[in-house]
Image (spheres, rainbow, N blue to C red):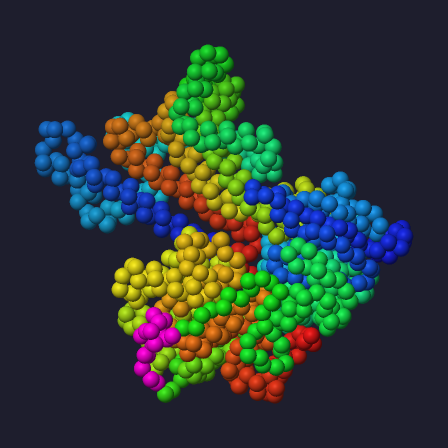
């Protein structure tokens, strides 16, 4: 068990180093970073001096190592566009994205899994068929369209919900939250639904397919032959076995919610990291892009690690015992 | 602790039989019309009695059991008839009332112990869950009883083992756990659907003993479904023979086995390979129409299969294994001393002479299949050499050289369902080795050869256009044989080629292999756990136990005068059925 976790951790470090390499090469692609810092009439000698000062004349490998060292401490330099430390910018935006993502994930899982189970167990019922048809719509509609529809109906026509921004936020010093004010909560509703729809429908279909598979297995038949109650069979045996393969996908999907909040954030002008990233791309703000890349990679790696550990907790066959 | 036993419940019923199935008809409606899975089946079962239901796959045996316990897979339904338990009709009960009967009054044991248990729950959890569903006892009592039950079904060290997960038990032990689960609420009737088919001979004997003991001790009635006449002989009091969804004969076991009335029963019994003597051909189940497609004789001098058969004369053995050893890592660890290994093949050496059928017997896990896989190059041995036709296969480096030798040896696998690519047409499956080894000049010739091969294994050339799933198990095994022949091999490795098949199909396949072996002068390594089959097929036999070759002798010598204790043990376990 310990060995397993250590091995997974080592793999995670490797993945992070690879992503760091990609993020690092971003800087190399956009030409001389010195040009981004100085103006046109800086002398060549002056440029050389700055170059030396910043260590940009060191061998690439040394520079890369320095980048990794800094990244490990959350240090990504200064944004070209906003002239502020990147770490500070991210810290400002991160809570917004994380709150949105977590609410979306809760929505997607909290509705998706029960609905998947329901549609699997009542395959022939018309409600289940309706859910499946709706889920097809959810999978195929683009996120921005759903967002715009919601804004049109609930924001513009009915005027129930705010159409953009986070509303009032409470600053806790290290975290800003919209969960404590009425306007903050109201602002969360539409973006989180928009972000959750795709994942939710995907989870419905996945859980349904996997559950149908499990319901056909011998041990479910044997459980029926033992006269167990339906509830025990469906939730005690079938659902638990369904979750083993489903967890992987769900883990990746939760990562995707955080990473691809970009579109939703753009539609709702949500002041999160996604919006920061989109703006960074349009202005070639490399330090912000690199930092975002690293952060998202970290999110995925952490989620994957959690999924791997969950696997072992759920499935006794993966536990290697003495 | 007092649990309502079957005796008290039964007192309520009059002198009606414990279980009565009357005129059962089960239908499976489908798009292409209604399939009748069971028709006019009437059976009775008394307390303490073991009733066997025998027949081939698809005869409707399992359908009867599932109808009895109310678990027919939809859209299957009982179209007519009635089922009475202790005189009371149970087939018309509402689902909830039927659920209370399942597990409580009727228990059921399934075929495959490896898939019958929920892999995510401990044995204790599953036992306690079942008991708490049906019995008015506390969780503490249920836990105590769980340990008692495991002891009763013969699981050593029950108090510790009860906390284990299913994957920590061997196949035989798992079947014991399944039985413990089926009887944990003291059912009056036990339905056992092929309970020993997936198990080794020695484990099979133990499980049958256990079932017999439990039935006698508890006065249960047991309905045991099997395709194996040996099982019927070993354990049943009465036997019912099913053929194509009909019941053709019911009677006391020794009567039906020795003086069967129905011609189907007669030919079914005759098809069981006799363990005590050697016969020329396997008797076919003649009653089944179109059972054996006779293969026409080949003229090797002109036929494609006969071409390029000149492999160069060698005096020595065709295949020689020298000190073969193979280990598998069972517990990986960073620290070498903490690693655990399982020795699958332990210093095995033997020769196979040209034109000989060499048998390997042993229980599962004895290393038979591992040897087959080493010979065909699927595994690389840890030590030792495989010398084929004078060439050391283990030291060959060049791909071309390896392929040249590989062409000469082919393998037929045990499971006809997973050894054929389901996405490929049968014609392409058979053509693949011909194309790979470039054995034909043109695509037209490839197609001609494939058609000929399929014809020759008794499938007909039109089979080439269909997909594997359209064929039955026996037909798929014929496809495997055609594919193996497609490289014009001289050495065939058959790894349990018929253990997934019915008796009648087994006879056909084995006869086909025998014919081909004689016609083409093939050399064969024939792996099986079925001693009667080995006796009919092989010239010499090697006996394997825990990775070691413990005895090697001419077949008749081995069966008549076994030297090693283990061989004697295996022979003693062989179900001996008096031939009719």
Report whether B58 appears left or right of A177. right
Residue A51 appears in which quarter of the rendering? top left
Tell me if residue B364 comes above or below residue B68 in the rendering: below
Main SS of the magenta part reads loop
Tell me if residue A17 comes above or below residue B164 in the rendering: above
Residue B305 percent location from the top left of the image = 36, 71
Residue A28 percent location from the top left of the image = 21, 41
What residue is at 89 percent from the left and 55 percent from the top?
A: B15
Choose between B408 and B1: the one closer to the eye: B408
**Residue numbers of the magenta segment:** B299-314
Choose between B27 and B156: the one closer to the eye: B27
What residue is at 41 percent from the left and 42 percent from the top?
A: A300
Residue B88 percent location from the top left of the image = 83, 47
The C terminus of chain A - image quarter: bottom right
Question: Taking the image as drawn, is residue A103 in sight?
Answer: no
Report whether A316 appears left or right of A93. right
Q: Tell me, yes or no, whether the highlighted magenta stretch contains residue B221.
A: no
Tell me if residue B469 comes above or below residue B543 in the rendering: above
What residue is at 61 percent from the left and 86 percent from the top?
A: B560
Residue B456 percent location from the top left of the image = 43, 67
Report whether A194 appears left or right of B564. left
Q: Tell me, yes or no, whether the highlighted magenta stretch contains residue B302.
A: yes
Question: Taking the image as drawn, is residue B56 in sight?
Answer: yes
What residue is at 50 percent from the left and 19 percent from the top?
A: A186
- Tally the marks: 0
Residue A127 appears in which quarter of the rendering? top right
Report whether A161 appears left or right of B169. left
């Amino acid at each position: 068990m310990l060995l397993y976790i250590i091995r997974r951790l080592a793999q995670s470090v490797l993945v992070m180093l690879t992503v760091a390499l990609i993020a690092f090469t971003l800087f190399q692609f956009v030409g001389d970073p010195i040009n981004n810092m100085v103006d046109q009439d800086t002398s060549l000698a002056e440029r050389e001096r700055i170059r030396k000062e910043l260590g940009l004349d060191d061998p690439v490998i040394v520079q890369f190592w320095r980048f990794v060292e800094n990244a490990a401490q959350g240090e990504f330099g200064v944004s070209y566009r906003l002239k502020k430390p990147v770490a500070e910018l991210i810290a400002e935006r991160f809570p917004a994205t994380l709150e949105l993502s977590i609410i979306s994930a809760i929505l997607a899982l909290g509705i998706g899994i029960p609905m998947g189970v329901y549609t699997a167990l009542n395959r022939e019922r018309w409600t289940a068929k309706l859910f499946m048809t709706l889920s097809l719509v959810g999978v195929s509609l683009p996120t921005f369209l759903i967002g715009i529809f919601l804004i049109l109906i609930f924001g513009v026509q009915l005027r129930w919900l705010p159409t953009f921004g986070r509303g009032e936020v409470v600053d806790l010093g290290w975290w800003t939250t919209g969960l404590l004010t009425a306007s903050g909560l109201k602002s969360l509703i539409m973006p989180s639904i928009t972000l959750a729809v795709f994942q939710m429908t995907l989870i419905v279909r996945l859980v349904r397919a996997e559950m149908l598979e499990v319901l056909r297995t011998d041990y479910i038949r044997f459980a029926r032959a033992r006269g167990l109650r339906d509830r025990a069979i469906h939730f005690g045996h079938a659902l638990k076995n369904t979750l083993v393969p489903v967890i992987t996908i769900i883990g990746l999907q939760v990562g995707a919610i955080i990473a691809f909040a970009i579109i939703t954030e753009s539609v709702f002008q949500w002041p999160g990291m996604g919006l920061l990233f989109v703006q960074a791309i349009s202005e070639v703000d490399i330090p912000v892009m690199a930092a975002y890349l690293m952060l998202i990679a970290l999110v995925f790696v952490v989620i994957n690690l959690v999924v791997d550990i969950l696997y072992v907790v759920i499935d006794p066959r993966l536990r290697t015992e003495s | 602790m007092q649990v309502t036993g079957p005796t008290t419940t039964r007192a309520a019923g009059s002198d009606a039989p414990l279980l009565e199935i009357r005129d059962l008809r089960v239908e499976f409606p489908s798009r292409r019309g209604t399939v009748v899975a069971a028709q006019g089946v009437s059976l009775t079962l008394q307390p303490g009695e073991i009733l066997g239901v025998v027949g081939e796959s698809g005869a409707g045996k399992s359908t009867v059991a599932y109808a009895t316990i109310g678990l027919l897979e939809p859209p299957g339904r009982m179209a007519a008839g009635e089922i009475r338990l202790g005189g009371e009709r149970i087939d018309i009960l509402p689902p909830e009332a039927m659920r209370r009967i399942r597990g409580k009054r009727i228990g059921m044991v399934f075929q495959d112990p490896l898939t019958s248990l929920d892999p995510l729950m401990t044995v204790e959890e599953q036992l306690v869950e079942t008991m708490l569903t049906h019995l008015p006892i506390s969780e503490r009592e249920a836990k105590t009883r769980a340990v008692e039950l495991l002891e009763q079904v013969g699981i050593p060290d029950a108090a510790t083992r009860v906390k284990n997960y299913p994957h920590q038990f061997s196949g035989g032990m798992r079947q014991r756990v399944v039985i413990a689960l089926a009887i944990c609420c003291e059912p009056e009737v036990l339905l056992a659907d092929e309970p020993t088919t997936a198990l080794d001979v020695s484990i099979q004997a133990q499980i049958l003993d256990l079932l017999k003991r439990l039935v006698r001790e508890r006065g249960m009635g047991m309905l045991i479904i099997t395709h194996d006449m040996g099982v019927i002989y070993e354990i049943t009091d009465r036997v019912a023979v099913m053929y194509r969804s009909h019941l053709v004969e019911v009677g006391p076991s020794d009567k039906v086995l020795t003086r069967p009335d129905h011609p189907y029963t007669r030919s079914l019994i005759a098809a069981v390979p006799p363990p005590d003597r050697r016969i020329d051909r396997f008797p076919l189940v003649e009653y089944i129409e179109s059972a054996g497609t006779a293969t026409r004789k080949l003229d090797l001098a002109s036929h494609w299969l006969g071409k390029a058969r000149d492999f160069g004369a060698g005096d020595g053995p065709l295949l020689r294994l020298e000190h073969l050893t193979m280990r598998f890592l069972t517990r990986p660890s960073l620290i070498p001393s903490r690693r655990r290994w399982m020795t699958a093949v332990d210093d095995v050496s033997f020769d196979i002479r040209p034109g000989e059928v060499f048998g390997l017997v042993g229980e599962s896990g004895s290393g038979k299949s591992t040897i087959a896989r080493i010979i065909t190059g699927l595994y690389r041995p840890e030590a030792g050499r495989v010398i084929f036709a004078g060439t050391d296969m283990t030291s060959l480096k060049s791909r071309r050289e390896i392929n040249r030798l590989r062409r000469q040896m082919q393998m037929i696998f045990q499971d006809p369902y997973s050894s054929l690519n389901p996405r490929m047409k049968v014609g392409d499956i058979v053509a693949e080795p011909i194309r790979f080894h470039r054995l034909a000049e043109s695509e037209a010739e490839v197609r001609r050869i494939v058609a000929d091969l399929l014809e020759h294994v008794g499938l007909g050339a039109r089979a080439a256009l269909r997909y594997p799933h359209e064929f039955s198990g026996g037909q798929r095994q014929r496809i495997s044989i055609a594919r193996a022949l497609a490289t014009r091999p001289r050495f065939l490795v058959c790894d349990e080629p018929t253990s997934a098949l019915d008796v009648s199909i087994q006879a056909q396949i084995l006869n086909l292999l025998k014919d081909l072996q004689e016609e083409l002068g093939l050399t064969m390594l024939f792996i099986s756990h079925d001693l009667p089959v080995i006796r009919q097929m092989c010239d010499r036999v090697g006996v394997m136990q825990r990775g070691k070759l413990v005895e090697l002798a001419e077949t008749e010598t081995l069966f008549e005068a076994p030297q090693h204790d283990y061989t004697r043990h295996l022979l003693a376990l062989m179900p001996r059925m008096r031939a009719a």
